[in-house]
Image (spheres, grey):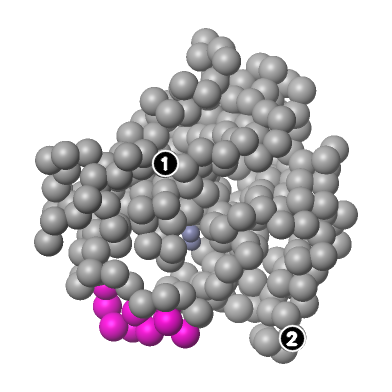
Amino acid sequence: MTLPIARDWYGLQSAEERIWCLTEPHVHPIFSANTFLVLGRDADLVIDAGMGIAPLRPLIDGIRPDRGKPLWLFVTHTHVDHIGAAHEFDTRLVHPLEVGGLANPEPYSLDAGDISPAFRQLFLDAGYPPLWPMLIDAVPRSGYDPAGYELRPAPATGTLEDGDTVDLGDWQAEVIHMPGHSPGQIGLWHEGSGTLFGADAIYDGPLIYDGPGMRIEDYAETFRRLRKLPVKTVYGGHDPAFGRQRFHEIIGDHLALWA
Ligand SMILES: [Zn+2]
Ligand SMILES: [Zn+2]
């Protein structure tokens, strides 16, 4: 099968002043995650690192006004769609429970035929469209061989736990441990603006809570905790941003479903 060459691999939007969102529109919706860049006074922060199909770092560096500042990668959890380009960053922060997933990522293939029937069913049941033959519908450059895709080890250089602060000098956010979708998933809560970086705990699309390493009891506890926050804006791990009303709808619907 010959796939077309994408004009741009990443989609890029300015979410708000100092926050950018990068997407991978040529990756199947199940694996098409958001990467965020938050520009700070003393350091810049990247949240998640996509599939790693095309280099991410040059695009990030192209946006940063000052490349001399430290650049930290905050890894919400170590599913394939969030860690692909992690090795391109020198500072990699993750929760202790996900350290192994960065150091020894499970091999992954872009050939959808390598996805087990159980997973296919799980994705369909969750509400995603059927998989394509490949997890991508284009290639990032001529000569790119999807069969050569591999996740590179990118061991954590530091760990973050619940209650820790990520401090960019003029922007501070609290680390929130959000188990359920993955044991060591972490998000970021920026109280000053009411902004939650919700990772794969909460986004405006089909949530995945039924697979390996997932626990509905933990997920429900995470949601009960998140809903106490005075959230105004959510930047999720997938799909577009949403506001307070949708945040409460998603949480309420799932807590009712799981009860
Ligand atoms: Zn994801
Ligand atoms: Zn995930």
Judge whether residue 219 can be spotted in this image. yes
Q: Which residue is mark 1?
A: 10
The magenta segment: 115-125
Left or right side of 22 for 194: right
- Considering only vertical position in the picture, is 64 above or below 136? above
Q: Quarter holding the N terminus?
A: bottom left
User: Which dot marks residue 256?
Assistant: 2
State yes or no: residue 254 in magenta: no
Q: Position of residue 167 (x, y in %)?
A: 70, 28
Secondary structure of the residue carrying numbered label 2:
helix
Q: Quadrant of residue 202?
A: bottom right
Secondary structure of the residue carrying numbered label 1:
loop
Q: CA distance from mark 1 to mark 2?
A: 36 Å
At label 2, counting other C-alpha atoms closer than 10 Å, the crowd grade (few under 14, some 14-19, many 20 or more) is: few
Q: Residue at x 68, y 87 (%)?
A: 257
- Considering only vertical position in the picture, is 254 above or below 242? below
